[in-house]
Amino acid sequence: MFNCPIRAGLIESLQTKVQQYPTIDNAFEHVEPLILEAFGAQRLSIFQRRSHHKDLVSRYKTGNDIREIKLAISTQSIAGYVAMAQQAVRINNPYNEKALNKVHNKLRFEQKFDRLRHLRTDNILCVPIKYKGVLLGVMELMNKEVDEFDDADEDLASKVSELIGEAYRYELGGTARPFDYLEYNAGLATDVLSKISINAAISDVIHQLGTEQGIPEARIHEALSVYFQVPFIDYFPNEYQLAQRNVKLSKSYLKRNHIVLLKDTLDRLVVVMYEPNNTSLLMEVENALGTDEYQLAFSLPKQILQYLGESNKQTALSKIDKIIDEIDVKEENGKSNELVPEGESAIARLVSNVLFEAKRLSASDIHIDPEYKRPTLVRMRVDGVVRDINEIPEIHHNAVVARIKIMSGLNIAEKRLPQDGKLTFTVAQQNIEVRVATIPTVVGEGIVLRVLAGHDAMPIEKINLAKHNLDALEKMVMMPHGILLVVGPTGSGKTTTLHAILGYINTPDKKIWTAEDPVEITQYRLQQVQVNPKIGFTFAKALRAFLRADPDVILIGEMRDKETASAGIEASLTGHLVLSTLHTNSAPETITRLLDLGIDPVNFSDACVGILAQRLIRTLCSNCKETYTPTETEMAFLHRHYGEEYLDELALTPQTQLFRPKGCKDCDSTGYKGRTGVHELLTMTPDLRALVYKGSSNTEIKKQAMQDGMRTLTQDAILKVLKGDSDLAQVQIISGAGIKPNSNE
């Protein structure tokens, strides 16, 4: 097939180079000439698929006259389309729209890159780079000098991409955990890797690997670079300098989030982050910069602070303490931050830094609690548990309350009645909304601030549904019409789950409307509406308005009354998929609750496709959790609460191990870090519909649902315990029962 000697020997030559240069960074300049000569092409680019950012980036390309190229995986570029379709594409004259339309009617060619390089692309051969079916990137050859790319070229390019994918799969595809690459390039034992937590402080692990395993820091930095899929930048003051750009990112913000903006010797912008996979933080930076033309890099806090002119980390807590000291001595240091302008009062800056600390800790609530003849407590709910954060001198309590009232538009003179309001604070041009409630107590006004989520939708596979529940839920939400309810108490993660579902079905061929109170999570293509009961704009009215707006999918934030429930069922029966929530304790109970509201059982049973009940339980800290052999009492607890008739599903043996909390600095010695969901999914089957028709009891409905495959919240919590996500104490909370020596609870 390959009549040219250079072409015939290309694969063998590439294999030799791959053995000589085990990293693609070092290998590219050596393999590039071989590939270009074999194909008779002028330019070569290798795009890496960045899983953290869901895009393509080309750092390996002919010439260095422009910055790295970032492309969305979409039809807006040829490389993006190849990554999306995962098939090779040949284009002769990419400037010809007809040639592009033959491949896909929405395919576009990014002409701006030609203009930047003062070149013209005459033809393109683009092939996906994969390893064992997983997309790692794209290889793009441009400007074949004689004739055009043909079938033989495509066949050879596929072989080359296959070789590149196998040789450099770690660098192109990243690793599941930060230090997995060390097993490949440094011979680190698997059992050592298994003891390293993904949540452990990276600097601590680097020290441990260096002192205990003798691994050079350069190797460790390389492993982290592979994991984050961006280059590692050490402290090189001669090669990088602080970028002087007019952006709304203060030095305190950069220090707190471990970010530094640098320029290299070619005056190109480099954004260096300790958390380059933190998408929301990166979006904040991009918004402040007003551009996405930069190189993203990774570094450690020590190096970042060196670039910023500091060697010691400053925390938000220390700032709060400093401001309190400042108030006590009645002085102002004149420093400004992102929330308040220079010259603002110390009380205002104190409140601002409390809000910043809540964001840093990912707290859901802030409690300002007055105490009798004692300092006011500042407490925050993190992972569902309230923590004491700091104290404010008693004499400053009223000033702090007044400041919060002013920010949230409340009456500062009214101290006898509860008030509700909201405020918004800004971090690097990202608005964070906070709901405020004041409540008079015998020692002064207490304030609770609910920090609304305001983050991107979580992928459906990340909400930790058991496999049988995930498979069933994915089938339900692909139905063209029906109603799906997500139920549970306040704070059980219903909104997160609903938006994960919407993210799963959010495709260009669907029109989705949502009515929420408030809108916490925003998504591309969704038309989202915030209801306002004070002016009569209720969920029911929003739903009826949506029906006139050509929807495919409708989300109603909550079914609070019969009117909203009836309207939702009516919408589902007229050809729409309706998602909503309800405050009930279990999936079967939801049916009886709706029937008690007066909903027609025939209509509801025909409309309902399923009900998902959920709770949130604390997860064990992956850095310090430890295994142990459960006692007979604990095994008896598992048997009772999972049910003897279902025990085969657990595959329990005398060797079964459970997990328990231990405590370390990574989890503030609590043993827990984060929360996860437990679920029960009721599927509306013909047998279950028949029971609903008859208005059967909750017990009968639950029995039938269990026969149809539903597993209860307690059973799902037990599965999470055996998986290592949580411990038996969390199952007791869900089940409402303790572990007792006898079987009578």
Image: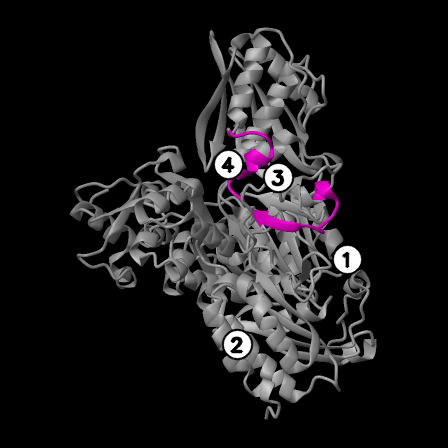
Residue at the disc numbered 3: 260
| Cα–Cα span, label 1 and label 2 | 57 Å
Structural distance between the alpha carbons of marks 2 and 4: 39 Å
User: Residue 94's spot in the image, x, y percent?
Assistant: 78, 75
Q: CA distance from mark 2 to mark 3?
A: 38 Å
Q: Residues within 10 Å of mark 2 (few under 14, many from 20)?
A: many
* Residue topped by disc 2: 14
Q: Earlier in the sequence, mark 2 or mark 4?
A: 2
Task: First in sequence, mark 2 or 3: give its number.
Answer: 2
- Does dot 3 land on a helix, a strand or a loop? strand
Which is more toward the observer, 714 or 330? 330
Could you tell which of marks 4 and 3 lies nearer the N-terminus? 3
Kindly report the distance in space between the C-alpha atoms of the residues bearing marks 3 and 1. Answer: 46 Å
Label 3 CA crowd tier, 10 Å (few <14, some 14–19, many 20+): many
Q: Is residue 150 above or below residue 32?
A: below
Which disc, if any, is residue 144? Answer: none
The amino acid sitting under disc 2 is: Leu
Q: Which numbered mark, 3 or 1, is in the foreground of this view?
A: 3
Q: Nearer the viewer, residue 624 or 508?
A: 624
Residue 68 placement (x, y as % from top left): 67, 58
Residue of label 4: 302
Examine the structure image and report whether residue 397 is included in the region drawn in magenta.
no
Residue furthest front in the image: 238
| Residue 288 on the magenta span | yes
Tell me the distance, in whole angstroms, between the alpha carbons under discs 4 and 3.
Answer: 12 Å
Residues in magenta? 287-311
Q: Position of residue 116 (x, y in %)?
A: 79, 60
Of the two numbered discs 2 and 4 in the rendering, the one whose residue sits closer to the viewer: 2
- Residue 737 appears in which quarter of the rendering? top left
The three-letter amino acid code for the residue at tag 1 is: Ala
